[in-house]
Image: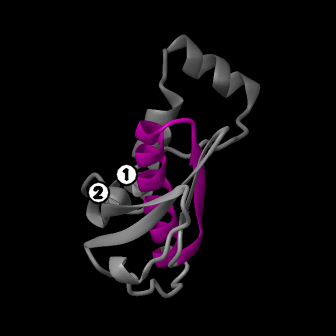
């Protein structure tokens, strides 16, 4: 896995906003109301798409050189760079909501003691899995 990538995005300026696509990464598409938002959205969609490709072991192509990308009159090319160690870390640190069931009497006792259920479950899982460090 590479640490960084740079792909060319096409910003397609229409009357109602900007459509964003990447010629080399067909599933990476987005839209925005203005250029500032388009830059943010392009980076975000590229990060998520590349992360998903890595996770699913889908080949990430070599970027097409800028001079080989042809634009229409209402389009502009924009180079979008991503630093994957930050993306991977952010994705792996996301919290996941879990639903669990415990007896009512146990719930009442825990609530009386102001137990933080999430923190306790995390601690118990780390202990059970013999994790000595924070992931």
Q: 15 or 90: which is nearer to us?
A: 15
User: Hey, which residue is sitting farthest front in the picture?
Assistant: 73
Residue drawn where x is 65% and y is 17% of the image: 108
Q: Is residue 14 left or right of residue 63?
A: right
- x, y (%) of residue 8? 40, 69
Disc 2 and disc 1: Cα gap in Å? 6 Å
Quarter of the picture holding the C terminus? bottom left
Q: Secondary structure at mark 2?
A: helix
**Is 70 placed above or below 127 here?**
below
Q: Which residue is mark 1?
A: 90
Residue drawn where x is 52% and y is 66% of the image: 49
State yes or no: residue 132 in magenta.
Answer: no
Q: Main secondary structure of the magenta part?
A: helix
Label for residue 86?
A: 2
State yes or no: residue 50 in magenta.
Answer: yes
- Range of residues picked out in magenta: 25-54
């Amino acid at each position: 896995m590479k640490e960084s990538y740079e792909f060319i995005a096409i910003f397609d300026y229409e009357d109602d906003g900007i459509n964003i696509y990447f010629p080399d990464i067909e599933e990476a598409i987005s839209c925005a109301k203005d250029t500032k938002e388009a830059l943010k959205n392009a980076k975000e969609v590229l990060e998520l798409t590349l992360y998903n490709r890595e996770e699913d072991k889908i080949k990430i192509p070599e970027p097409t050189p800028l001079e080989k990308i042809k634009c229409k009159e209402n389009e502009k090319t924009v180079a979008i760079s991503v630093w994957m160690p930050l993306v991977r870390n952010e994705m792996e640190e996301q919290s996941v909501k879990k639903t669990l069931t415990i007896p009512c009497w146990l719930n009442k006792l825990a609530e009386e003691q102001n137990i933080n259920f999430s923190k306790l479950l995390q601690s118990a899982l780390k202990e059970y899995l013999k994790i000595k460090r924070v992931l």
